[in-house]
Image (cartoon, helix red, strand yellow):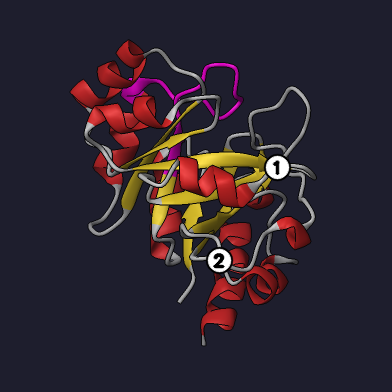
């Protein structure tokens, strides 16, 4: 069964809708330049509203250790997700399991990346867009993904209700990750689009 994460949640009601439609995880963006950035107070309210068994993921881009520690000191997160140039040692230093995001483009050796970050719980594969850390709504060539990566793959980048079933059939990832593909506007999720996305994920899981 392919797992799913709805990322860039900024409102408690959106997190609840994601859970109600079967999402396994929600993502909280602690990166101020992002239109999906949440304050610690916002994130705390979102997490408090979630039903049980939903994985909470905190997303960071080249943070200082103190930034991550400040969040973890106030909020329980199940996973950290790093989208910048963080080292394996940095990612592992907080005592919380982590995912490492890779912006995929020709020439990026995903096998070597997975070996370097072998302590990660998985690699999140996103589209490379110059100057953007993620959440662009752009897809990438899935043919660049090797067949046998030594870490679980979380597929991201330009996914939505129209293409997620094909993406799962082609890539066979451990999980899929969506943000802009289920939004009414940046940071505001659309319940109908979340429902449609999750229906397509479940079709492929039958």
| Mark linked to residue 173 | 2
Query: From the viewer's perspective, is 116 left or right of 105?
Result: left
64 magenta-colored: no
Position of residue 137 measured from the top left corner of the image (x, y, whole percent): 73, 44
28 magenta-colored: yes
Q: Could you tell me which secondary element the residue under label 2 belongs to?
A: loop
Query: From the viewer's perspective, is 127 left or right of 79?
Result: right
Magenta stretch in the rendered image:
27-41
What residue is rendered at 66% in x and 62% in y? Answer: 146
Q: On screen, 202 above or below 77?
A: below
What residue is rendered at 60% in x and 40% in y? Answer: 102
Position of residue 61 measured from the top left corner of the image (x, y, whole percent): 51, 24
What is the quadrant of residue 57 in the picture?
Answer: top left
Viewer-proximal residue, 135 or 41? 135
Q: Could you tell me which secondary element the residue under label 1 belongs to?
A: loop
Q: Which residue is mark 1?
A: 108
Q: Earlier in the sequence, mark 2 or mark 1?
A: 1
How many other residues sit within 10 Å of disc 2, few (<14), some (14-19) or many (≥20)?
Answer: some
What residue is rendered at 70% in x and 27% in y? Answer: 132
């Amino acid at each position: 069964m392919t797992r799913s994460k709805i990322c860039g949640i900024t409102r408690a009601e959106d997190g609840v809708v994601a859970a109600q439609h079967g999402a396994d995880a929600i993502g909280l963006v602690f990166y101020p330049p992002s239109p999906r950035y949440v304050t610690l107070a916002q994130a705390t309210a979102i997490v408090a509203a979630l039903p049980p068994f939903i994985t909470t993921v905190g997303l960071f881009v080249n943070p200082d250790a103190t930034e991550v520690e400040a969040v973890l000191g106030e909020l329980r997160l199940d996973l950290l997700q790093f989208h910048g140039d963080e080292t394996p040692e940095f990612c592992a230093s907080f005592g919380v399991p982590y995912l490492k995001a890779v912006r995929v483009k020709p020439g990026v050796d995903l096998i070597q990346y997975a070996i370097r970050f072998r302590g990660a719980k998985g690699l999140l594969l996103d589209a490379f867009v110059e100057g953007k850390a993620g959440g662009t709504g752009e897809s990438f060539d899935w043919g660049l993904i090797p067949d046998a990566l030594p870490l679980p793959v979380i597929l991201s980048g330009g996914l939505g209700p129209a293409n997620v079933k094909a993406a799962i059939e082609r890539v066979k990832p451990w999980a899929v990750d969506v943000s802009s593909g289920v939004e009414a506007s940046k940071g505001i999720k659309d319940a109908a689009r979340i429902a449609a996305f999750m229906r397509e994920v479940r079709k492929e899981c039958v």
